[in-house]
Image: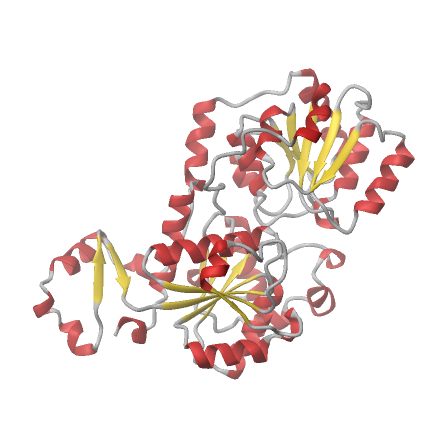
């Protein structure tokens, strides 16, 4: 169940119905230069302009969600632009950016505050909605210089992680700079309930300003087949992992567990993704003598066809913001095991009812889970239970929640 707190929740359904039924000529709000267009039971701010701010168009989860939000806000009649510090990355050719994108041409993402201020002065957005850590910090600096900016932030990664695992400003300074920069945001969005609680604690924000909206499942059908060159992986049972090769995802622990389980020669460990740790992981695989049983073909556009044919999906992350790949695996009928890390896996797997939650770092239990997947003895939840759980991640459901949140943050001048 998603708990989304926003100012509009204080209006009862009866109040909204009553407002909708008042003839325009009798609305006292007209005298206050406020007008609403009524769509069903939702009040839509007329003429609202929103800037979705990213550092780049890298192919990460937060960037994909920002594209999704931009497109769905526009579909709801809100004038949304996708603003990037520098137009580069795997998603630079996304159609929504081609149609509604703004490239600030900043020298780099951590030096984009001045360019962002120039954009704000020119475009006058009613709401600046910043995604990704560096963009949020630059937007926070811009707000300190222009206090009238209405800023909302979106948080996609766990905050309460070891210092060595943090983005470098947090590793050096902790969360103190962000508490100062985000003190006056109109809202903070988190992608899980656990992460929302971390935002309240670490950014010292009032709970009523922090909102939980899950990430959506892909709004396109799964690809029909895996890539032809990858068919050879499936001559044995396959255990799939998908994610960027970086310390947070801890594929090194997964590789050790696969080796310790004695699955080399019996199964194939398939790691989909790219990242800076590829050379280290390749060296680890060679050192363990399991190179003929571990495949790392790189990034694939859609992991779901691989999940559909796999014996199981395993997530070995040290921390997550959400971990949508778990929901994708469930949607394809794939057995799932995951480290019970902060934050997201427990919510995605319904407290362990839809997949196995393993104490974070317990490689022995992870190995045992992979053995059961390979042997076909890993328990599977009922399809009805999975489908009922996944409805809350439906793209239209998530889009409606973003639209409601953004509308609730409309300033008076957007309502004029």
In front here: 242 or 370? Answer: 242
Which quadrant of the rendered structure holds the N terminus? Answer: top left
Image height of 18 relative to 261, above or below = below
Q: Residue at x 21, y 77 (%)?
A: 33
- Which of the colour schemes (rainbow, by chain, secondary structure, one colour) is used? secondary structure
Q: Is residue 259 left or right of residue 17?
A: right
Q: Residue at x 64, y 55 (%)?
A: 160
Where, by quadrant of the figure, is residue 288 drawn? top right
Tag count in the figure?
0
In front here: 280 or 343? Answer: 280
Image height of 319 relative to 134, above or below = above
Q: Position of residue 406 (x, y in %)?
A: 38, 61
Q: Position of residue 74 (x, y in %)?
A: 37, 58
Image height of 368 relative to 119, above or below = above
Where, by quadrant of the figure, is residue 308 drawn? top right
Q: Is residue 159 left or right of residue 252?
A: left
């Amino acid at each position: 169940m998603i708990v989304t707190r926003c100012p509009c929740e204080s209006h009862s359904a009866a109040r909204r119905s009553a407002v909708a039924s008042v003839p325009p000529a009798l609305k006292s709000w007209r005298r206050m230069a406020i007008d609403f267009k009524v769509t069903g039971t939702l009040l839509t701010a007329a003429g609202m302009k929103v800037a979705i701010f990213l550092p780049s168009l890298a192919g990460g989860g937060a960037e994909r969600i920002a594209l999704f939000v931009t497109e769905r806000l526009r579909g709801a009649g809100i004038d949304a632009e996708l603003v990037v510090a520098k137009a580069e990355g795997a998603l630079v050719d996304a159609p929504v950016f081609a149609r509604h994108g703004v490239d600030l041409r900043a020298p780099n993402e951590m030096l984009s505050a001045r360019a962002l201020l120039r954009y704000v002065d020119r475009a006058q957005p009613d709401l600046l909605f910043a995604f990704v850590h560096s963009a949020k910090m630059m937007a926070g600096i811009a707000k300190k210089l222009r206090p009238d900016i209405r800023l909302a932030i979106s948080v996609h990664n766990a905050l309460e992680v070891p210092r060595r695992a943090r983005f470098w400003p947090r590793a050096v300074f902790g969360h103190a700079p962000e508490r100062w920069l985000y003190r006056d945001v109109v809202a903070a969005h988190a992608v899980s309930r656990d992460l929302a609680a971390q935002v309240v604690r670490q950014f010292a924000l009032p709970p009523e300003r922090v909102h939980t909206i899950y990430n959506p499942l892909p709004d396109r059908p799964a690809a029909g087949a895996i890539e032809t060159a990858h068919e050879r992986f499936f001559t044995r049972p396959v255990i799939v992992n998908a994610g960027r090769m970086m310390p947070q995802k801890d594929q090194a622990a997964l590789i050790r567990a696969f080796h310790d389980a004695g699955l080399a020669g019996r199964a194939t460990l398939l790691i989909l993704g790219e990242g800076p740790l590829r050379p280290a992981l390749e060296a680890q695989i060679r050192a363990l003598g399991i190179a003929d049983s571990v495949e790392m073909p790189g990034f694939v556009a859609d992991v779901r066809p691989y999940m559909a044919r796999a014996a199981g999906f395993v997530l070995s992350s040290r921390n997550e913001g959400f971990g949508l790949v778990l929901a994708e695996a469930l949607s394809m009928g794939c057995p799932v095991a995951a480290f019970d890390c902060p934050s997201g896996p427990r919510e995605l797997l319904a407290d362990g009812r839809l997949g196995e939650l393993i104490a974070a770092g317990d490689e022995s239990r992870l190995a045992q889970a992979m053995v059961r997947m390979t042997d076909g003895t890993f328990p599977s939840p009922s399809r009805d239970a999975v489908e009922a759980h996944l409805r809350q991640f439906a793209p239209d459901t998530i889009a409606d929640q973003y639209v409601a949140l953004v509308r609730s943050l409309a300033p008076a001048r957007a309502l004029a």
